[in-house]
Image: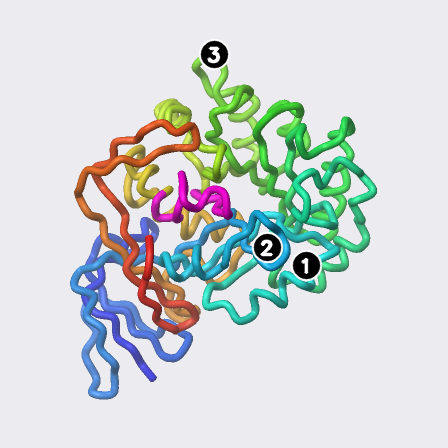
Amino acid sequence: MKVLFQNCKLIDKYSKHNGSIVDILVDGELIVKISENIEVDSTYILNDMNNTYVSAGWIDIHTHCFDITTDISIDADKIGVDTGVVCIIDAGSSGAGNVDEFYASICDKKTIVKAWLNIASTGLTDRHELKKLDNIDVEKTIAKAQEYEDFVVGIKVRASASVMSEDMHTPFVKAREVATEIGKPIMVHIGNYPPTIDDVLSELKENDIITHCYHGKPNGVIHDNEIRETVIAKRLAGLCYDVGHGQESFCYKVAKKAIALGFKPDTISSDLHKYSYEKPVHSLSNVMTKMLSLTSLEEVIYYVTGGAAKVANLTGFGHLSVGEKANITFFNVEHKEILLVDSMNETINITEVIQPRACVVNGKYWEVTKW
């Protein structure tokens, strides 16, 4: 069965069709043609998108969706395809001790789900997972990451005093051992300290990821009205920085100042979970809308497509390409004035709103039910 999506305005800063009205022909699970004018065949199912924007399927690299076991998590489809997001990546809700259960729980989801595996074997069944270092089992974590090679994108470490014991170095040593063995990056949560941001940065290498890069807590990326030299040095060395909005981890004023200083993120993610869903996050598009007030639409879309796919090493994602799986998001940008809030409960005046309309996941079309 071939489906022709007509009259879509493509947003992909690396595509030759960027900014153009295109047609996209999907055959089963695959994209078979992208052109500014595809001739209609009588066997095609036609879907006129009426100049709706189109991009590669959105990816949210920081969520929590292990909802059958951890009290923090939320249903994958509620924060995935229901809001136009094709792929979500759970950030450490499961560890080596319960990833089997997590994987089994998401196999029937409409949304593509992947995971950062917590270095703590229990994941987030309690949120003080690194208070006891014997909760880390390097050999088992390596084994489970290899068993679920296509599911696990890397290792998660939460670097906060409320999570860790006095020994804040050993979890990084063990996470590095696992990451090196499986050939995948480490994502690190930063926030309340200790450890300081410089302590954390000293533990990280090329292709690792800092999430919550614009938090409003002390000891952030800005110091004395400048981006910290250590933060810049690590970016030049290949470290990636993710928004990771969450309940307490996105300060609009910090983001605005940092971007004005030239420090843009590599990815936009939501850190959606039970306690951030109603307020202040609600959806990835809500976070994208906040970031749209600080940078261009092309950049915002890249951060949740090509940028996200690069950071998480997802093949077949990030760009709309002939021969790849049909993972697509359709959306509008509406000019209207609304008020949103950040994690500090500060009001943000918004004049342009990104509204997802539908998505295609491995060739299957889904209407957005909420945003």
Query: Which amino acid, mark 1?
Result: Val
Q: State whether the magenta stretch is mostly helix, strand or loop.
A: loop
**Where is residue 126 drawn, in percent x and y?**
68, 44
**Cα distance in 3D space between marks 3 and 2:** 36 Å
Residue located at (21% from left, 59% from top): 52
Task: Give residue 160's mark.
Answer: none
**Cα distance in 3D space between marks 2 and 1:** 9 Å
Q: Are marks 3 and 1 in contact (CB under 8 Å)?
A: no
Query: Dividing the picture into quarters, in which one does residue 66 lie?
Result: bottom right
Q: Give the range drawn in magenta.
A: 268-286
Task: Give residue 115's mark.
Answer: 2
Query: Which amino acid, mark 3?
Result: Asp
Tell me the mark number nearer the camera, choosing from 2 and 1: 1
Query: Element type at marker 2?
Result: strand
Give the residue pinned by disc 1.
99
**Where is residue 307 drawn, in percent x and y?**
44, 47
**Cα distance in 3D space between marks 3 and 1:** 42 Å
Give the residue pinned by disc 3.
224
Query: Element type at marker 3?
Result: loop
Q: Which of marks 2 and 1 is nearer the N terminus?
A: 1
Tell me the mark number nearer the camera, choosing from 3 and 1: 1
Residue in the foreground of this view, choosing between 168 and 39:
168
